[in-house]
């Protein structure tokens, strides 16, 4: 695939993922941050994260968030005429960290039944 | 106006800053990038903090405790400002790019971004500092 074609897809998906992230963020603030207790208490977090709908919702948006973020970082860096190795290095490093944190997020949410809250 | 040939092909970041046209629109462009980078950083922190859930209630509460102090409440308000600006300005970008009317009304949309942003910031200040809906 030519790089010109690729960046127009990236441009498109940056907007689509952005819209989805806005939808998520509104839902997130409404459910988790309407009151202080809702977001900061262990019990309410456990209750939410045991709900399959919330699991799907959150993990989808962890993926989308990191995709949008790393793609955005790449878009910014491309405006500075960095040496190729430096650009690849920064994006590669942050991208790898993002992949690890996606894994971490999945592991946290999907291991909810093994958390130490259960009697 | 004649184009001035630069001596060095390398454009430094302070060169860029000097050349920016400091209008509300270009400020929005820069803010969108700054807030975007900050939010990417915050996403890492957020997942790292929630990781404490696995350790059980005591560990989670210990990790969450600092966030109830006035300093962190202010920081969360600032975080909301970042999220809010990035979201509103992002919607504006999508409207300008994807809708036929958006490009014609981009100035109105920009005013909406700043106006709505300030209004929602004030509303969030009430939620954070006074917690009126607490049960």
Image (spheres, coloured by chain):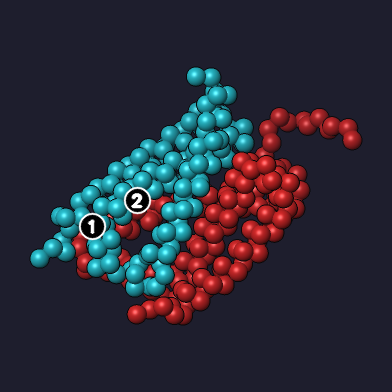
Which residue is pictured at 43% across the width and 53% down the height? A24
User: In percent of the image, x 57 and y 72: which residue is there?
Assistant: B122
Image colour for chain B is red
- Quadrant hosting residue B84: bottom right
- Pointer 1 residue: A50
How many marks overall? Answer: 2
Image coordinates of residue B120 in percent, x first then y, are 56, 67
Q: Residue at x 50, y 46 (%)?
A: A18
The residue tagged with tag 1: helix, strand or loop? helix
**Relative vertical location of residue B53 with respect to residue B123 in this rendering, above or below:** above
Task: Look at mark 2 in the image and give the residue it sits on.
Answer: A57
Chain A rendering hue: cyan
Q: Does B125 sit left or right of B8 as displayed?
A: left
Any part of residue B17 in sight: no
Asked if residue B129 can be seen in this view, the reply is: yes
For the residue labelled by badge 2, is the local secondary structure a helix, a strand or a loop? helix
Which chain does the residue under circle 2 lie in? A
Query: Are there few (<14), some (14-19), or many (20+) residues within 10 Å of tag 2?
Result: some
């Amino acid at each position: 695939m030519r790089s010109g074609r690729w960046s127009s897809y990236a441009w498109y998906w940056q907007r689509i993922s952005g819209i989805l992230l806005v939808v998520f963020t509104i839902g997130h603030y409404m459910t988790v941050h309407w009151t202080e207790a809702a977001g900061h208490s262990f019990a309410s977090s456990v209750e939410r994260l045991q709900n399959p709908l919330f699991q799907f919702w959150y993990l989808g948006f962890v993926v989308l968030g990191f995709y949008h973020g790393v793609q955005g970082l790449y878009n910014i860096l491309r405006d500075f005429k960095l040496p190729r190795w430096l650009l690849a290095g920064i994006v590669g490093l942050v991208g790898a960290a993002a992949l690890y944190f996606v894994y971490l997020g999945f592991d946290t949410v999907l291991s909810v039944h093994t958390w130490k809250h259960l009697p | 106006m004649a184009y001035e040939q630069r001596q060095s092909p390398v454009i430094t970041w302070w060169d860029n800053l000097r050349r920016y046209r400091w209008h509300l629109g270009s400020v929005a462009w820069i803010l969108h990038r700054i807030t975007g980078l900050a939010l990417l950083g915050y996403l890492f922190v957020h997942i790292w903090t929630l990781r404490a859930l696995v350790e059980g209630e005591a560990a989670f509460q210990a990790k969450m405790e600092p966030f109830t102090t006035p300093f962190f409440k202010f920081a969360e308000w600032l975080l909301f400002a970042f999220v809010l600006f990035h979201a509103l300005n992002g919607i504006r970008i999508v409207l300008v790019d994807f809708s036929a009317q958006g490009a014609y009304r981009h100035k109105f949309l920009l005013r909406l971004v700043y106006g709505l942003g300030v209004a929602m910031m004030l509303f969030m200040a009430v939620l954070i500092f006074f917690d009126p809906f607490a049960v």
